[in-house]
Each structure stands twice: as structure tokens, then as C-alpha cells.
Image (tube, coloured by chain):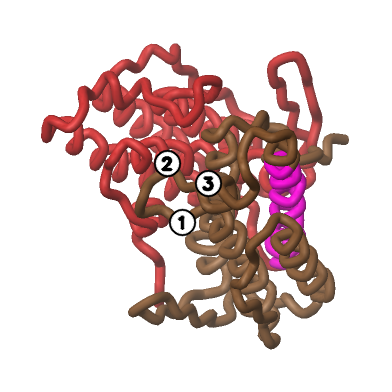
Chain colours: A red, B brown
Amino acid sequence: MSVSMYQISVPVCIRALTNLDNFLRKGQAYASEGNVKETVLLKSRLALDMFPLIKQVQIASDISKGVGARLAGIENLKFDDTEKSFAELYERLHKTVEFLSSISPEQLDGSEEKIVELKLPGIQMSFKGIDYLFSFALPNLSFHITTAYNILRHNGVKLGKADYLGDLPAI
Amino acid sequence: MSVSMYQISVPVCIRALTNLDNFLRKGQAYASEGNVKETVLLKSRLALDMFPLIKQVQIASDISKGVGARLAGIENLKFDDTEKSFAELYERLHKTVEFLSSISPEQLDGSEEKIVELKLPGIQMSFKGIDYLFSFALPNLSFHITTAYNILRHNGVKLGKADYLGDLPAI
């Protein structure tokens, strides 16, 4: 029994959002080189009934701030989902990381057993903190970040796995 | 300090592979309904220079068995990457889950500080077990499972987030 809830949640979300921010900038650069309009890229999707790029980023922000707020038991950050540009998405990611960075490891002590309430469209569920994190929040966060990556790749942006994983903390 | 390395690694991988197996079967059913040939679906990709569906599944298996073998310090399971059908992919996922299921929680005690060696094409890196898991293995596993999901969705298979997340351990 040797890992804290903090180290497997808040920094993991910050890292994932930082990588997302970095590869979104490559998507924006691809647009600015004249390959596609920013607004077209932000609205593109992998299937007609899947969310577009802009929404993938908004959801990645939502999941991350939800992890911090729910496990720490503090008021959540709110956004109006009005972003329409890369610049506004970076601003949202920046504010989300700032919010997560304000949470201390101590605020998450014992949160593995804490009851977390989750309201999804049409359903409300309760989880133990550890189950919320590993069965829902972290896989879901990776889902939306990977889908953002896949939308960019599908549209011709040159990205590689290193963009998704970010700098690796090798020793 | 209250979560074990086992509970945040081996069962997380088993759960992810089980969900992957379940939604692959929906892809196979879509093919068997005459929408596409199985072999075409298995070879489809989201970008010309991305891996096809079959390889996404092979890599998800590789990452998962790597987590078990590296953190437990035991010999890894080997596959020849010769799968050519859905049936062979299920068999591989089944064997991977069986391997992971044979690992006990005690075998992972202390693995958060254990040095994990990782050989990637052209590079070899060393990580602390906890960093290997959260900066590399788990995000990478979700990446390939999400990409498999996205390939199926992009090709018309009816899947939803519930297929990706699987049964949620709500209380």
C-alpha cells in the first residue's frame, strides 16, 4: 500500500492536458500553413454522430477538473462551452491546469474510499473514488485526448506517438 | 498512502482488454451483416500512416502483458503477431487476460519504485514503475483501444461510450 491518490490523479490529468495543448498547437500550425481553415478543423469529426474536435477538448477539460473537484470535495470550475478558436481552447486548458495545480496532495488523502457522485445524461451513479478514477475518469480522459489526436491525424496533421505521450520521465 | 500498485495496473488492463474484446465483437457482427468484409475492416486505418485495426489490438495486448511482466519481474508472454481474423484476436486477448490473471497482488508489491527498462525502436529508457505506468503504459493502452474504437466508428459500426467504458462498478 504505497501510492497516494494524488500522484495517480491530479498530475496525471495535468500531464494529459499539457500534451493535448501541445499537439493542438501543431493542428493550428497546420491550419495556418493554409491546409485547412481553423474553423473547419475544429468542427471536424471521425463519424457523423461523434463529437467534433472542439468538443473533444472541452470534455477533456471537464473530466480533468471533475477529477480534482470530486476527489478533493471542492467546488468545481465552470465553463460555458463557448470556445470557437484554438486560442480559446488553450485558455480553457490553461485555466483547467491552474485549477488542478491549486489542489494539494493532502486534499486527496483518503479519497480512494470517498463516495463520488456522477451525473451523466439520464443517469446518476455513485462510485468509490478509486473506481471512479480507474473505471471512468482516466480511461475517459484518454479517450477524448486520443480522439482529438485521431481527428488531427485523419485530417493530415503530422503527429506521432511522442506528441500524445509527451516528455517521458525516464531516469 | 493507500493504494496498491496491483489495483491500479493489472485489473485496469484486464478491464480495458475485456471492453476491447466486447466492442470488437460488434465490429465483427457489423461485417457479418454484410456491411464490409472482415478482412477489410481489420485492415482499415484512420490515416495512411497510422496502424490498422488488427495492429491496434496487437499493441493493446503487448502493452498490457508488458505491464504485468515488467512490474512483476516475470517472463513475458510472446506472440508472433500473425493474427488475421477477429477470432484470432479474441484468442490473443483471452491469453493476455489469462496471463495477467495469473499475477498476484503480492508480486507487484513495491513495484512503484522498481526500475523498469523499456526498449522502443531506436531507444531504451528506464523508469520508476509508477512513472512507467502513468506516463507511458496506461495512456498508451487507452490510446490503442480508443483508436480501435474510432476505426470501427469511422467505418459505421454502431458503438457508444458505454462500449468503451464497459460495465461501471457503481455502488
Q: Chain of mark 1?
A: B
In the figure, is residue A51 to the left or right of A116? left
Quadrant in the rendering for residue B60: bottom right
Q: In the rendered structure, which segment of residues is drawn in magenta?
A: B1-28
Q: Quick one: SS at disc 3?
A: helix
Say what amino acid the circle numbered 2 marks. Asn
In the figure, is residue A122 to the left or right of A158? right
Where does residue A55 sit, x and y in percent of width and height?
A: 45, 23
**Do pointers 1 and 2 mark residues of a single chain?**
no
Residue B147: image tag: 3
Q: Nearer the viewer, mark 1 or mark 2?
A: 1
Q: Residues within 10 Å of mark 2 (few under 14, many from 20)?
A: many
Whether residue B7 is visible, yes or no, is no
Whether residue A144 is visible, yes or no, is yes
Label 1 to label 3, Cα distance in Å?
A: 9 Å
Residue drawn at the location 65% of the way across and 48% of the way down: B38
Q: Which residue is mark 2?
A: A150
Residue drawn at the location 54% of the way across and 39% of the way down: B150
Instruction: Depth check: give the residue in front, A142 or A51.
Output: A51
In the displayed structure, A90 sits above or below B167; it is above
Instruction: Check whether the beta carbons of the residues at disc 1 and disc 3 lie within 8 A of each other.
Output: yes
Residue drawn at the location 34% of the way across and 55% of the way down: A160
Where does residue B108 sit, x and y in percent of width and height?
A: 72, 76
Instruction: Depth check: give the residue in front, B130 or A30.
Output: A30
Instruction: Check whether the beta carbons of the residues at disc 3 and disc 2 lie within 8 A of each other.
Output: yes
